[in-house]
Amino acid sequence: MELKICHLYPDVLNLYGDRGNVICMESRLKWRGIDVSTASVSVGEPLRAADYDLFFIGGGQDFEQVVLLEDLKGAKTEEIRSAVRDGKTFLAICGGYQMLGSYYKTWDGQQCDYIGAVDLYTIGVRQRMIGNYMFTCDELGGLKVVGFENHSGKTYLGAGVKPVGRVLAGSGNNGEDHQEGARYNNVFATYSHGCLLPKNPVLCDHILRTALAAKYGSAELMPLDDTLENNAHDYMVNRLSKA
Amino acid sequence: MIGMKLKVWISVLSCKLCRFAIRLLGRGGTDFPGRVALKLCPDLLGYLAKDVTTILVTGTNGKTTTSRMVEQALTDSGISFFANKSGANLLSGVTAEFAMHSSLGGKCRYPYALIEADEAAFKAISSYVNARVVVVTNVFRDQLDRYGEVTHTLENLKIGISHCADATICINADDSLTRSIADGIENHVVFYGVDIPIYRDRVAELSDAPYCIKCKHEYVYDYVTYGHLGGYRCPVCGYSRPTPSVSVTSVFSTDTERSHVSIAVDGREFDTTVNLPGGYNIYNACAAMACGKALGLDPAVVSRSLSEFSCGFGRMEKFQINGTSLRMILIKNPAGCNQVLNFLTNTTEPSVFAVCLNDRAQDGKDVSWIWDVDFERVAAMGDRLTELLVSGVRADDMAMRFKYAGVPAEKIRVIRDYGKLVEACIAQDRPVYIMPTYTAMLGLREKISKTYGFKDFWE
């Protein structure tokens, strides 16, 4: 088996240790003897979505995100939209999450149109939502996911889009409806960086399994020794449960 | 309505009493006395600093070390000054330092002050003091939960500099972000920089500024020193590295104790030994030479000072305990930590590393930055790294990071207790490099000074 990962804009969308998620996915595949290759596609480089099984999009600084909005227009937007429609697996975080939606409206009313691959939109507010936080992953039986959020956008989901889960501590999508993240087809989107996957190995494996199943029909992943991962996970769960 | 003089008298007295009480308790207390004084008299710093010629050092990385270098240069040049040595670099801490060095009437006992200013607090501090020279070291992404994005830090620095109409501004020419501060200001500017690459072999690191700050086109680099620093130019709008008047022209040698370089000041070369290892300290030395030029000091004297200065606490600070050599190197953000690794992974003698990760406000609450550091380099050291000790509030995250970096599990040992960690370090029969985040550094240093009789950090 082999998984081909596409890391979109790694030099621009790399704000919060995002490459840790890619390192984590690569390692957990290699440790199981599954081949993996990661290609970077950045500004000015063409994207052929059919070449890949799993797409990763991180978050960036506002200054650099403006650079890539120009690049995203046209061909890349079409490629990403059809990849989402065709059931390719995506993990999108923070800015990447917002970018899959329809638009971002700044607090003073300026609207940036985004990819529009998933029915959601984001409204900027002046007060940032920052801190360690925790939410459930509903499709994994309410598994507790821990991470760090740092965003000034409030994201709202359309009718056909489900959240990843319910916020247990922190703000989540918008600090209002207690929802966190977005699930649509094989898209996983979340505000959780800090770094999401290493500390949540069950979620990481679930995303890898989704991508492998989409490619090969079904996929079993052999268990790994996750002592260090679980220590880091449980430490934050305990700390946030006490708060 | 009480008069200003009485208000100052009460505030300075309260500040001194608070500091005295805290020191009696055996603690640092570098910030709290200042907060008390500011409560009583919000513009106290303006009053205390009005007749003091002040040198401000700010920027993301290198503030403390650059300040220690300038400190030595001032001493060697016979200038009477005080400095905020304890690292209290917010408005409250700086106010407290001025109060401690003033009479109760608010008259400072020194004509000069050397002040390291936190980059977010700089604009407040600079609005009160009478700055003669401002040194800006660099701007890197740092603790995003606290400082926000780099452009935000840069804006704050620009506002701060607008308060310093009479100051000469020393600017790192190699940093495309910092360099933009020079545009549109009337101040006299001294650019400094490094004319050549400093590392033969660098860690893989992200650039914090790949796109032109003026026109958003990708930069072209003639050479990179580290991070986004080097000889950049924008092929579209022409924004580029200016020619510095103070620059490092050659690096003759570097080892685990010092670097030997040549620094040119207005075309005159000064053979200089920098009394600390690491390429980033070559930058700090260059910044100190630029500061000396701005102050009109003799460059030969400043050059000699660089070979004699002693480093700030926790900045490559060396402890020799029971025959084991420990060096403590503060880590706080990806760029700084990558430079530490550039130095450490190029050492040849086998050694032990200890990394201590906390997530309190001063460390940055968000620990995700450890994934932007090229710790894979540590794994690639092989037998040159004999053991890796991990500690701190977020020891589990750190241990996991090393696992994914490829360090064999049997080399990683988690020791949560600082006392036990220090004991484990001293028990080694090879050099130990301890890399703590800020509050971990204070904790470890306290442990070492209490147990083994070293100076406390505020001394």
Image (tube, rainbow, N blue to C red):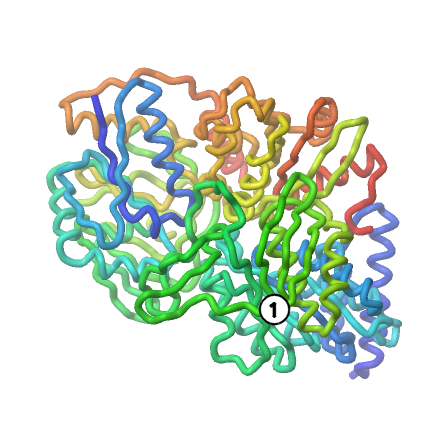
Quadrant location of the N terminus of chain B? bottom right
Residue B244, position as x, y percentages in the image:
54, 68
Residue B4, position as x, y percentages in the image:
79, 82
How busy is the neighbourhood of tag 1: few (under 14 within 10 Å), some, or many (20 plus)? few
Subunit of label 1: B
Q: Nearer the viewer, residue A67 or A232?
A: A67
Q: Can residue A176 be seen?
A: no
Q: Mark 1 belongs to which amino acid? A: Gly
- Left or right, B14 with reference to B56: right
Name above or below for residue B236 compared with residue A191.
below
Give the secondary structure at mark 1.
loop
Residue B116, position as x, y percentages in the image:
68, 62
Which residue appears at 20% of the width and 41% of the height?
A: A184
Residue where numbered disc 1 is placed: B267
Q: Nearer the viewer, residue B209 or A239?
A: B209
Residue B269, position as x, y percentages in the image:
65, 63
- Which of the 4 quarters of the picture holds residue B422? top right
Callout count? 1
